[in-house]
Image: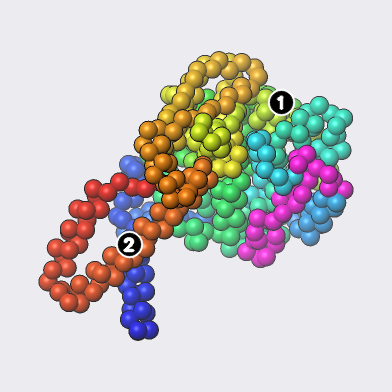
């Protein structure tokens, strides 16, 4: 029996491997042979691989690093902040770097660690190891909020109405090694799954720092975010790449909102909006120079998170005595960007009319091909939008009737709650299941869906075992059985 069990397990793993094999499709359109995108190799040998390794960087001297916190000093500063400002903060780690440095995050809120129907914002610094200004500015931001809470209007607004998460360094190894990439010499801002070139979307094949960010975003339900870089002075917004790999303006569905957010940062900055290179101090990523595997596009597509890439200093590694000036130039921009989560957009909660339970429904804006999801526990949603325009807000969830309404968004945010009515089919299912002692409230429905998914997986395994046994008994009929199964599968609705 153990031998049979082992054979069956190996058969199942083999089937999964076959199902996950990559196809010959390179991308959606575009000839990579003619226009290879930055960060990718050509078609040599019939393969297309990510090229994330770069070696030619200017040498960073001891004199340049003097005055910057080392990784151990940064960790000490984070823990010291947590003790000093324990009433409005907590710290936690989202993982470790290749060399084992914890990726510490500071959460700032009047109720840190508690889930509230409030928007969440995250700052990420030091994505590239040789761009350390962000890690210093983010610690200055955290301490400024702590020092000015309840005395400064903007600081109080952020602490009371936003959950702010600060990751001072995403790439501590690169900082210690004084280079762009991490300890494996991988550029972390080319390491995320990409919509235009989905070559390898297997999570475990990515760098530990990248995986940590991906898990963090999936679990965090962030409304918006920004990563801090150096080497230019501009607010960059999606998309970062283009489908045909050319340098051209490539707009996301929320292009107008992204331009508003980028302009808000640029106009609040001391001199970013006066740029001679970038009109208004902002740029579309693909128009500036296309990249693939970038973090901001992935955040928007997979996390429902509106992310900007902020280039905050012309010099990648300026002298430490320049940091106070750079902080002074960027402080108002950073604060205004976080506060915009409360000051603009549409916010609300979604409930079931039958039992009052919160619903993780989807929120859509008519004419914009993008959705944000309400949280599964509180049913709250936060949708960034450009002020001064009219929007038709639509809310939908399987098993409930869709609802919508039109709003005119002024200079302030709009608060809009929805109460969804179950559709007739759901009401019948509710009555039927209730007879077996199931309350079937919003939470139980989600648990029921998860249970059914598990049942389908068990059925799938049993079918695989049956096919294997049929192969041993009647090898000649295997193809017919497979074809028949394929036809049946195509007729079944997918359980979501």
Q: Could one spot residue 364 in this view of the protein?
A: no
Earlier in the chain: of badge 1 and badge 2, it is: 1
Q: To which residue does mark 1 refer?
A: 268
Colour theme: rainbow
Q: Position of residue 331 (x, y in %)?
A: 76, 33
Q: In this view, does 353 lie above or below 185?
A: above
Q: Within 10 angstroms of label 1, few (less than 14), some, or many (20 or more) residues? A: some
Magenta segment boundaries in residue numbering: 84-111
Q: In this view, does 487 lie to the left or right of 164?
A: left
Residue drawn at 65 percent across, 30 percent down: 341
Q: Is residue 224 left or right of residue 77?
A: left
Residue drawn at 77 percent across, 49 percent down: 90
Residue drawn at 21 percent across, 53 percent down: 488
Q: Is residue 31 above or below residue 179?
A: above
Q: Quadrant of residue 154?
A: top right
The reply to whether callout 1 and callout 2 are in contact (CB within 8 Å) is no
Between 164 and 310, the one nearer to me in the picture:
164
Tell me the distance, in whole angstroms, between the alpha carbons under discs 1 and 2.
56 Å
Find out whether residue 89 is within the magenta segment: yes
Q: To which residue does mark 2 refer?
A: 460
Q: Position of residue 381 (x, y in %)?
A: 58, 34
Q: Could one spot residue 365 in this view of the protein?
A: yes
Q: In this view, does 226 lie to the left or right of 40?
A: right
Q: Which mark is residue 307?
A: none
Q: Is residue 85 above or below residue 482?
A: above
Find out whether residue 362 is within the magenta segment: no
Q: Where is residue 439 in the image (x, y as percent from the top left)?
A: 50, 45
Q: Which secondary structure lies at badge 1?
A: helix
């Amino acid at each position: 029996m153990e031998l049979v069990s082992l054979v069956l397990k190996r058969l199942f793993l083999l089937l999964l491997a076959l199902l996950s094999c990559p196809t010959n499709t390179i991308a959606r359109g575009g000839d990579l042979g003619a226009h290879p995108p930055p960060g990718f190799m050509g078609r040599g040998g019939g393969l297309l691989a990510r090229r994330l390794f770069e070696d030619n960087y200017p040498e960073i001297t001891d004199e340049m690093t003097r005055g910057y916190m080392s990784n151990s000093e940064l960790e000490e500063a984070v823990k010291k902040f947590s003790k000093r400002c324990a009433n409005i903060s907590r710290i936690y780690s989202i993982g470790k770097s290749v060399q084992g440095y914890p990726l510490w995050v500071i959460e700032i809120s009047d109720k840190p660690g508690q889930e509230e129907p409030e928007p969440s914002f995250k700052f990420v610094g030091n994505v590239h190891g040789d761009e350390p200004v962000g890690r210093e500015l983010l610690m200055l931001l955290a301490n400024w909020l702590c020092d000015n809470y309840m005395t400064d209007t903007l600081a109080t607004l952020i602490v009371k109405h936003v959950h702010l998460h600060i990751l001072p360094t995403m790439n501590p190894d690169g900082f210690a090694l004084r280079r762009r990439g991490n300890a494996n010499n991988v550029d972390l801002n080319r390491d995320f799954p990409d919509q235009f070139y989905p070559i390898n979307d297997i999570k475990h094949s990515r760098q530990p720092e990248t995986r940590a960010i991906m898990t963090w975003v999936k679990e965090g339900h962030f409304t918006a975010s920004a990563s801090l870089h150096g080497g230019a002075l501009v607010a960059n917004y999606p998309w970062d790449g283009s489908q045909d790999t050319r340098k051209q303006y490539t707009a996301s569905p929320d292009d107008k909102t992204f331009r508003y957010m980028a302009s808000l940062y640029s106009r609040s900055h001391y001199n970013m909006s006066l740029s001679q290179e970038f009109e208004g101090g902002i740029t579309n990523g693909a128009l500036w120079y296309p990249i693939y595997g970038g973090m901001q596009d992935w955040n928007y597509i997979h996390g429902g998170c509106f992310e900007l890439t902020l280039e905050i200093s012309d010099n990648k590694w300026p002298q430490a005595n320049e940091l106070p000036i750079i902080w002074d130039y960027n402080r108002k921009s950073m604060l205004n960007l976080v506060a915009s989560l409360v000051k603009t957009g549409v916010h609300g909660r979604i409930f079931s009319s039958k039992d009052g339970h919160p619903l993780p429904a989807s929120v859509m804006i008519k004419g914009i091909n993008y959705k944000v999801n309400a949280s599964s526990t509180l049913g709250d949603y936060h949708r960034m939008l450009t002020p001064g325009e009219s929007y038709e807000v639509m809310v939908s969830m399987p098993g409930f009737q869709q609802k919508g309404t039109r709003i005119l968004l002024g200079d302030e945010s709009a608060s809009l709650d929805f109460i969804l009515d179950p559709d007739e089919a759901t009401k019948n299912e509710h009555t039927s299941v209730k007879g077996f002692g199931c309350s079937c409230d919003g939470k139980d429905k989600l648990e029921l869906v998860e249970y059914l998914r598990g049942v389908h997986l068990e059925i799938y395994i049993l079918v695989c075992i049956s096919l294997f046994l049929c192969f041993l008994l009647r090898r000649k009929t295997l193809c017919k059985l497979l074809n028949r199964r394929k036809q049946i599968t195509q007729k079944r609705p997918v359980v979501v």
